[in-house]
Amino acid sequence: MSPLLQIAGLTAHYGDFQALFGVDLTLGQGETIAIIGANGAGKTTLMRAVTGVARVTAGAVTLAGDNITRLSAPDILVCGIAMVPEGRKLFASLTVEENLLIGAHARQGNGFWTLERVQSLFPILKERRHSPGTALSGGQQQMVAIGRALMSNPQVLLCDELSLGLAPVVIKEIYAAFPQIKSSGTSIIVVEQDIGQALRVADHVHCMMEGRITLSGRPDTLSRDAIHDAYFGVSHA
Amino acid sequence: MNLSRPLGLIAALLALTTLYALPTFAPRAMVQDLFGILTLLVLAMNWNMLAGFAGLVSVGQQAFVGIGAYAMFAAVILMGLDPLVGVLIGGLAAAAFAVPMAFFAFRLNGAYFAIGTWVVADIARLAISQWKALGGGTGTSLPKGTAKDMAFVGPIKEALGVSTAAAADALTFWLMLTLAVAMLATSYVFLRSRMGLGLQAIRDNENAARSVGVDPLRIKAAVFVLAGFVTGLCGALAFIQITRVTPDAAFSVIDWTAFVIFITVIGGIGTLPGPIVGVIVFYALQRLLADYGTVYLIVLGCLGIAVMLFARRGLWGLFTDRSGIDPFPLTHRPPTSLALRHGDLK
Amino acid sequence: MIWIDTLAQGLLLGGLYALFAAGLSLVFGIMRLVNLAHGDLIILGAYLILTIAHATGLHPFVAVLLAAPLMFGLGWALQTFLLNRVLGNDILPPLLVTFGLSVVIQNGLLSAFTADSQKLTAGAIEAQSMDLGIVTLGVMPVLTFASAVAVVFALNQLFYRTALGRAFRATSDDAVTAQLMGIHPQRVFAMATGIAMVVATIAALYLGTRANFDPSIGPARLLYAFEAVIIGGLGSLWGTLAGGVVIGLAQAIGASVNPEWQILSGHLAFVLVLLIRPRGLFPRAND
């Protein structure tokens, strides 16, 4: 069976600066993969390239057999890839509920995730539904951002740096929702600097450095040393 | 490249000499025509300094033209001064008006600055319309014989062997030409100076400029007031030749600002030769379409829009990009960073 | 008693200015675009109503129903094919493009309709008035003011109660993230400008029925509209209505002292408000 999402030879630039060097990656149906790496490794650029926010200079992104590389960001969402952006990026002039509803802006037809299901996944979002989105705590805002992305009923959910700037207990609370998201059939890519969290949640882990994938494997087969090397670029040779 | 600079310089000097000599051999109508072109050129160079280099998109330049003109008329009619002294007073009055205008308009950001300056210019027009001693809303004319009594007119008349009116035209022409040349030279020197580079740094990135110790507000205010001064001089000089002033004519947003904006944009905003190129295109268009009434304004508007869509640095920018020749380099940056800036704009 | 009359007239005049300004305010609120051609587009709307009324013999109040969708289409096309291409961090291109548009529209109208002044004739309603005891108000000015309130109310409902309004606000907050929600910012902008042109058509109806107009008066309307928007506070539609009323009152009071001071008083009120409250009367919190 062909994978749900296939990224092949993906290259991207910021002006003259090349941020991605031929990245290959696959995501199977119902699978969760994690991409780890230090700041500036190209993780966020990869997410932005896949969602059509950053311009791809070479390579291809295929979703369920369809080439979506050149589509605009809104069209890619309609195809079934939703993103929880780094820094959450809630809309300041929308309430919590409106932030969730706007996630379903382009949705066609029905799906598992509805306002009620998202609110039962994160009950606080129902309680605070009339608050401005940005009035919530960082963790709660992250929940809104995840819920907002789910509202489009994506085939693939991209989560960029969910744990950034959050307390460990809050991070745990957020990741506690993952089994339920997975069981809805959504495939997930998490980008994390928190290696421990990434290893716990993912079926496959890929390590990035300087715009390339330097290490891939199942969490249980990767040694701490190997990850450390791939992360920081230290060589044992 | 090595040859183009000295050759360009020789061509420029030759053109300049011809221009100065023009009143000695050319018909009066031609001198008057060129006077009009030079007026627009001076105004365009000033607006280019504001919008192209200081990032101040003013739609209120007609305020300075009008105040310059009215101050000159006041000096002549109410105080009995020589019109040339009146021109100086016109410039000073415009600069004085620029100070409170800046105080007000600088509170408005970006696009709102544009309409804010427009409102202030309208206030000036309406206030001047209340000045009954200068004819109120219907305006007034320079007294008969003003041109004859103007300083230097007598000697010029004798030297050239022309009528008083032609001598006055020659004088105002030379003064406007000198103003244009001085403005061009000053702009060039200023933009290459520390302060001028600071100004361009502000335009490109205000925060970065502030972090290296450039005070955006002070430089911008200084440029605004100076541009007001020169625009006032220009307006006063222009109305010596027109000899009649009304609030609507002196504060006309079309004549003194819209044309000037299109000239600068079409020629190349933010480039030094842009206004010169623009004024030539403008004049050619005006001549070509003279028989079709308002059509040339429509063409002008469309041209301005087209330039903004397809070639943001105007005809001059297009020329330097295509040919790689820039006889007036304003920056000390390597060419690559310039190319990057062009890319950023798109 | 004359003072009460002056204030009432000023208040109602403010309604007209608020109508001029509402479209400008909407567009600025959503895409930070200052459309320097807004005044000329209102005048264009007035000529469109005039042409339809002449061609079909319809009453202007009916003709406006035909003009509005055409103006919506014009606004939509203008945004899609022209303005979207110049929106960005650099404020110069949109300003100059709309300024160019202003000159093109003005002179286009001049070629098509000459400089003669025109008027939309609404019939008997123009002369009717209602006696409220202390003041007598013209029916047209009252209708204008009521329309302004209705337009601002409707725009607010649209903004805060509909999916389109949600998309407007989200795009205004953060256009890049809005794209991740499946929103095409450029389509949202085209809708917004289309709606602004519908409002401009309503403004044109009252402009044309209450007084004479000719192709040259657009920029002056732009200035009044702009003053109303700024006084009200950027992005606040009710603020825009309040701003229109401030300008209307200032003009009426000025005119009652000396008719030549009408416009000047409005401008001076604008400058005064801005010196005291640089962000207007009702500024939005997150600007």
Image (cartoon, grey):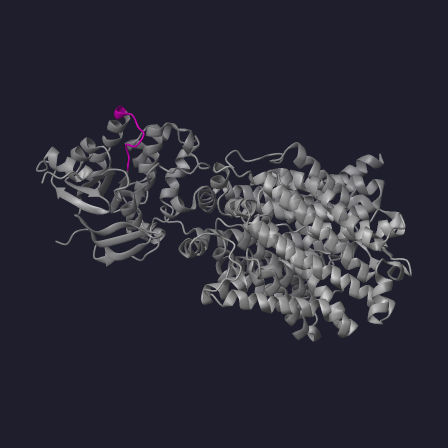
Q: Is residue B12 visible?
A: yes
Foreground residue among A70 and A24:
A24
Foreground residue among B262 and C38:
B262
- Say whether residue B210 is left or right of residue B74: left
Residue drawn at the location 68% of the way across and 54% of the way down: C219
Foreground residue among B132 and B149:
B149
Q: Is residue C38 visible?
A: no
Question: At which x and y percent is residue A149?
Answer: 32, 41
Residue drawn at the location 34% of the way across and 39% of the way down: A148
- Say whether residue B201 is left or right of residue C131: left
Residue drawn at the location 35% of the way across and 46% of the way down: C180
Q: Quadrant of residue B98?
A: top right
Magenta residues, start to end: A161-169
Question: At which x and y percent is residue A233?
Answer: 18, 40
Quadrant of the rendering where the N terminus of chain C is positioned = top right
Q: Is residue A162 magenta?
A: yes
Tell me if residue C150 comes above or below residue B142 in the rendering. above
Q: Is residue C87 magenta?
A: no
Q: Quadrant of residue B283?
A: bottom right
- Say whether residue A44 is left or right of residue B22: left
Residue drawn at the location 14% of the way across and 43% of the way down: A215
Tell me if residue A108 comes above or below residue A199 in the rendering. below
**How many numbered marks appear?**
0
Question: At which x and y percent is residue B313?
Answer: 52, 59
Question: At which x and y percent is residue C99?
Answer: 61, 57
Magenta stretch: helix, strand or loop mostly? loop
